[in-house]
C-alpha cells in the first residue's frame, strides 16, 4: 500500500507521538491532533486513510463515538488503548471502516523495538490488518493476535495485578511513616529497583495506571485473589512461621515455573 496518510488523535504526546515517529520512518504521511492543535480530530477523519485513537483511556470512548461515524469502509480505524474490549466494540459499532485494536506492550520511551510485544485484536477487514502487521513484523516486534476478551484477561495479570502490587508497596511504605531519604540509606539493589518503579507510577501520570486497573472487567477477581493471598500469608506465618511460608512458596514455584 502506497501514499498512505495517517491521522493520530492524541499524536501530540505519549504513545501517539511514538507511533507517529514509527509510521513516518516507514515513509507514511502523518498528521496529529490534540486538544489544542489547529487540525481537529474530525478533519483528520476526512483527510486520512488511517485514523488512530491514542488518547487517555477516560477520553477514548467519547473520541471513538465522535470520529467513528465520519469514516467509510475504505478507511481504517484503530486504537492504541491499554484495554481492548470496550474500544474495539465501540469502533465496530460506531464505524463502517475496517477496524483493528492494537496494544503496544511498552511505553513511548523504549530504546529498542526488537523483542517488544504488540497485541493486535482483529476487528473488521484484512488488507489494513496485513499493512499494520507488516510494519510491526519488519521492525522486529513480536506480534500476538488475540481477541479483545483474551487480551484484557491477560492484562489483568500483567498490568492490573502487577500495578496493584506496586501501588500496595507504595501505599504501605507511606503507612510506615518513614521518609524515602532514610529508607534509601538502608536499601538493597532489589529494593532500589522496586522503589524506582513505585516512584515512576506515583509521579509520572498515575492516571494511566488507575484507569488500567479500574477499567478492566477482571479487576474484582484479581483483587479477591490478592486479598486472599495476603490473608493466607498472614495465616501461614502465624500458624507455622517460616516453614509455612516456605512451603507455600515451594508449592507455588512448582505450579508457576
Ligand atoms: N503510556 C504508555 O505506557 C502506554 C502504553 C501502551 C498503550 N498506551 C495507551 O495509549 C493511549 C494514550 O496514552 P498516553 O500514555 O500516550 O497518554 P498521554 O501521554 O496522556 O497522551 C495522550 C495524548 O492525547 C491527547 N489528548 C488528551 N485528551 C484528549 C482528548 N480529549 N481529545 C483528543 N486528544 C486528547 C493529549 O494531547 P493534548 O494534551 O495536546 O490535547 C496527548 O498528546 C492510552 O489509551 C493508553 O492506554 C499507553
Image: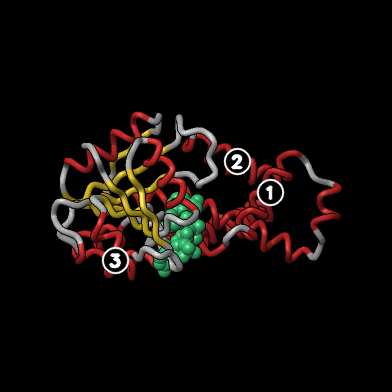
Question: Which mark lies nearer to you, 1 or 3?
Answer: 3
Q: Residues within 10 Å of mark 2 (few under 14, many from 20)?
A: few
Which mark is first along the chain, 2 or 3? 3
Earlier residue among tags 1 and 3: 3
Residue occupied by mark 1: 196
Q: First in sequence: mark 1 or mark 2?
A: 1
Mark 2 — residue?
247
Task: Identify the disc placed on residue 153.
Answer: none
Judged from the image, the secondary structure of the residue bearing numbered disc 1 is helix
Question: Tag count in the figure?
Answer: 3
| Ligand 1 location (quadrant) | bottom left
User: Residue sitting at 33 percent across and 48 percent down?
Assistant: 102
Q: CA distance from mark 1 to mark 2?
A: 30 Å
User: Is the distance from the Cβ of mark 2 to the nearest ligand 1 atom less than 8 Å?
Assistant: no
Residue shown at 42% from the left, 55% from the top:
11
The 10 Å Cα crowd at callout 1, few under 14, some 14 to 19, many 20 or more, is few
Residue 4 placed where, x, y %?
26, 43
Q: Position of residue 9 (x, y in %)?
A: 37, 59
Secondary structure under tag 2 reads helix
- Read off the residue under disc 3: 42
Residue 186 left/right relative to 88: right
Left or right, 195 with respect to 160, comes to right
Amino acid at each position: 500500500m502506497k501514499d498512505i496518510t495517517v491521522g493520530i488523535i492524541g499524536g501530540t504526546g505519549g504513545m501517539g507521538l511514538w507511533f507517529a515517529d514509527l509510521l513516518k520512518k516507514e515513509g507514511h504521511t502523518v498528521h496529529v491532533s490534540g486538544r489544542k492543535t489547529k487540525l481537529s480530530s474530525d478533519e483528520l477523519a476526512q483527510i486520512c486513510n488511517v485514523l488512530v485513537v491514542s488518547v487517555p483511556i477516560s477520553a477514548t470512548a467519547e473520541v471513538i463515538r465522535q470520529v467513528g461515524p465520519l469514516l467509510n469502509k475504505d478507511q481504517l480505524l484503530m486504537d492504541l488503548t491499554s484495554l481492548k474490549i470496550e474500544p474495539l466494540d465501540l469502533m465496530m459499532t460506531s464505524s463502517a471502516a475496517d477496524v483493528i485494536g492494537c496494544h503496544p506492550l511498552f511505553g513511548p520511551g523504549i530504546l529498542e523495538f526488537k523483542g517488544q510485544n504488540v497485541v493486535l485484536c482483529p476487528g473488521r477487514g484484512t488488507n489494513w490488518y496485513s499493512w499494520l502487521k507488516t510494519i510491526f513484523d519488519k521492525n522486529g516486534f513480536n506480534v500476538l493476535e488475540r481477541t479483545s476478551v483474551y487480551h484484557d484477561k491477560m492484562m489483568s495479570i500483567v498490568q492490573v495485578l502487577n500495578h496493584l502490587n506496586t501501588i500496595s508497596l507504595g501505599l504501605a511504605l507511606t503507612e510506615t511513616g518513614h521518609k524515602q531519604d532514610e529508607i534509601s540509606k538502608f536499601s538493597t539493589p532489589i529494593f532500589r529497583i522496586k522503589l524506582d518503579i513505585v516512584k515512576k507510577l506515583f509521579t509520572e501520570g498515575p492516571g494511566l495506571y488507575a484507569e488500567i486497573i479500574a477499567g478492566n472487567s477482571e479487576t474484582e477477581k484479581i483483587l479477591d485473589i490478592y486479598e486472599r493471598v495476603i490473608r493466607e500469608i498472614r495465616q501461614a506465618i502465624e500458624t507455622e512461621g517460616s516453614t509455612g511460608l516456605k512451603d507455600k512458596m515451594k508449592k507455588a514455584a512448582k505450579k508457576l515455573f
